[in-house]
């Protein structure tokens, strides 16, 4: 799974979160292909939220580009990179949260779904894997560790966020915290502003394997 997210995460069960990205999820689609997905919750997934359109929440508006669609081409290590352009933005008037994919708005999450997203305090970019306990963990991204070569490991580039004044900028190194709970199996590197076509960039991934619980 590779995704971006915005959230408000209080200490109670009222954590609100929206995620969008791509994933491989045989339990949802019945195969090992790559799909565009989104998810949401207003209580840290206790009773609310789901993937895609599996529950009420996300409003699909684009007639051709849709959440849950298959990504027909994927990147080749050392070769052609397939880039997915995604963003989450809030409409300043309706307060709805829009999902933009490949330059077009494809749908939105109504603001009424959430209890405290108006004060969202965290955004993020990265990847994760999920597997039953005591079984090998699948690869993340391309299956290779970050090495600052963008035809090797999975990446996000040209990343940015809006502050409370809705001014957009890239996060400085001092503003970013990285988290990696299995450094033997995966890696993550935030490079800051690399300039040019890369801009503010992060790279992550790894081979997985016997990573523990």
Image (cartoon, helix red, strand yellow):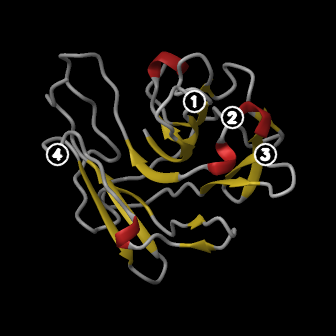
Please tell me how crowded label 1 is: few (under 14), some (14-19), or many (20+) other residues with Cα within 10 Å.
some
Q: Is residue 11 left or right of residue 153?
A: right
Residue at horizontal 28%, vertical 31%?
138
In space, the residues marked 3 and 4 are separated at their CA atoms by: 37 Å
- Label 3 belongs to which residue? 96
- Label 4 belongs to which residue? 183
Task: Indicate whether 78 appears above or below 95.
Answer: below
In space, the residues marked 2 and 4 are separated at their CA atoms by: 35 Å
Q: Is residue 9 left or right of residue 60?
A: left
Q: Are marks 2 and 4 in contact (CB under 8 Å)?
A: no
Q: Are marks 2 and 1 in contact (CB under 8 Å)?
A: yes
Q: Looking at the picture, how far across and down is residue 167, in whole percent?
A: 66, 73
Between label 2 and label 4, give the one nearer the viewer. Answer: 2
Between label 3 and label 2, give the one nearer the viewer. Answer: 2
| Mark 1 residue element | loop
Between label 3 and label 1, give the one nearer the viewer. Answer: 1
In the rendered structure, which disc, 4 or 1, sits on the residue that comes first in sequence? 1
- Label 1 belongs to which residue? 14
């Amino acid at each position: 799974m590779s995704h971006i997210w915005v959230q408000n995460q209080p200490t109670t069960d009222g954590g609100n979160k929206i995620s969008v990205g791509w994933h491989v999820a045989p339990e949802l689609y019945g195969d090992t292909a790559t799909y565009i997905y989104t998810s949401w919750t207003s209580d840290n997934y206790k009773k609310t939220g789901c993937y895609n359109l599996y529950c009420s929440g996300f409003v699909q508006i684009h007639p051709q580009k849709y959440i849950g669609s298959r990504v027909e081409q994927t990147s080749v290590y050392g070769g052609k990179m397939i880039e997915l352009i995604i963003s989450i933005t809030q409409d300043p008037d309706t307060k709805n949260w829009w999902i933009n994919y490949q330059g077009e708005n494809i749908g939105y999450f109504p603001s009424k779904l959430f209890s405290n997203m108006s004060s969202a305090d965290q955004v993020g970019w990265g990847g994760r894997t999920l597997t039953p306990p005591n079984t090998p963990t699948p690869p993340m991204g391309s299956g290779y560790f970050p090495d600052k070569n963008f035809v090797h490991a999975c990446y996000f580039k040209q990343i940015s966020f809006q502050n409370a004044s809705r001014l957009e900028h890239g996060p400085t190194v001092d503003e970013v915290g990285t988290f990696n709970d299995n450094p033997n199996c995966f890696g993550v590197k935030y490079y800051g502003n690399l300039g040019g076509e890369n801009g503010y960039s992060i790279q992550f991934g790894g081979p997985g394997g016997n990573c523990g619980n």
